[in-house]
Image (cartoon, helix red, strand yellow):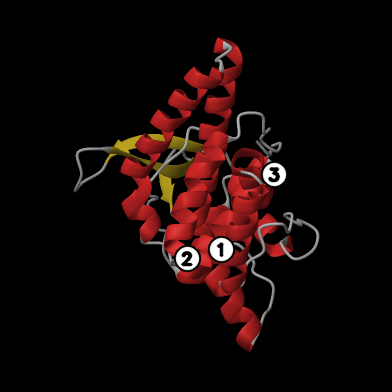
Amino acid sequence: MSIKNYILIFFSLFLMLQNAQAQVRKADGPRELRRSQVRATEKDSASLMLYEVDENGDTIYLDEIEPVYKVAVRKGREWRRYYRLVHNFAKAYPYALLAEEKLSEADSTITTDGLRRGKRNRYINILQKELFETFEKPLRNLTVSQGKLLLRLIDRQTGITPYEIINEYKGRAAAGFWQGIARIFGSDMKLPYDPEGADRQTEELVVLYQKGEFNVLYRSVFGQNPPEPVVRSRLDVKQR
């Protein structure tokens, strides 16, 4: 079985754990600067321009400077690893946010409605089917590296390892089987997310994303905005 099938199956399994909890989560100056709304010349939409009023009352329009994120100096292989991490994070993190959102919704529905085992299982099966129908194709387009990163990020957002999720719902035998599959592809479902150790650089990207500054970093590295995510969660943060 390919790593993409493995990712797809796991991404569905997180819905089945109803008791998991998601991990937390005008300076003064010498010149008067104002924002004026003007109509763009080539688009039927509005854009914002920065201007100042000089001592003679004349309006002078100013160029806005694109913010740049200062990336730590890296060379050779270290830089290539970071380059790939930033790219893969842009692809994978929206799915992790969606996992957190869907798990929270499932937990809330099951708890609030007090669903008994039969109704609970039917509810989960419906969610699982909807998830497969909606996200099977985009998830299959993830690379192996992006899929492995997605597992780490789902752990980060939900606060529970993939192994614990499968063990809770499917039992130890199934969890052991999927752990074996994961090890074939160089992953470990038992390994918890470590924001101060192995996952430190990933955690830095998460923090930037939550502050709305990830796109600034991405542009600093690649010279363009990241591609629009195929999925977008209600938990998503607007980026600069």
Q: Residues within 10 Å of mark 3 (few under 14, many from 20)?
A: many
Q: Could you say where residue 106 lies in the image, as x and y percent from the top left?
A: 53, 26
The numbered mark, 2 or 3, whose residue comes first in the sequence reads 2
The residue positioned 41% from the left and 64% from the top of the image is 224
Circles 1 and 2, Cβ within 8 Å, touching? The answer is: yes
Residue 19 sits in which quadrant?
A: top right
Q: Secondary structure at mark 1?
A: helix
As measured in the structure, the alpha-carbon distance from the residue carrying label 1 to the one carrying label 3 is: 15 Å
Image-based side of 45 in relation to 213, left or right: left
The numbered mark, 1 or 2, whose residue comes first in the sequence reads 2
Quick one: which residue is furthest to the right in this view? 196
Query: Which numbered marker is on residue 160?
Result: 3
The residue positioned 53% from the left and 36% from the top of the image is 15
Position of residue 132 relative to residue 19, above or below, is below
Q: Amino acid at mark 1?
A: Lys
Quick one: which residue is furthest to the top in this view? 113
Position of residue 71 relative to residue 233, above or below, is below
> Can residue 211 be spotted in the picture?
no
Query: Which numbered marker is on residue 148?
Result: 1
Q: Residues within 10 Å of mark 2 (few under 14, many from 20)?
A: some
Q: Secondary structure at mark 2?
A: helix
Position of residue 196 relative to residue 118, above or below, is below
Out of 81 and 96, give the one closest to the viewer: 96
The numbered mark, 1 or 3, whose residue comes first in the sequence reads 1
Q: Which residue is mark 2?
A: 3
As measured in the structure, the alpha-carbon distance from the residue carrying label 2 to the one carrying label 3 is: 20 Å
Q: Amino acid at mark 3?
A: Ile
Q: Could you say where residue 74 lies in the image, as x and y percent from the top left?
A: 67, 80
Q: Amino acid at mark 2?
A: Ile
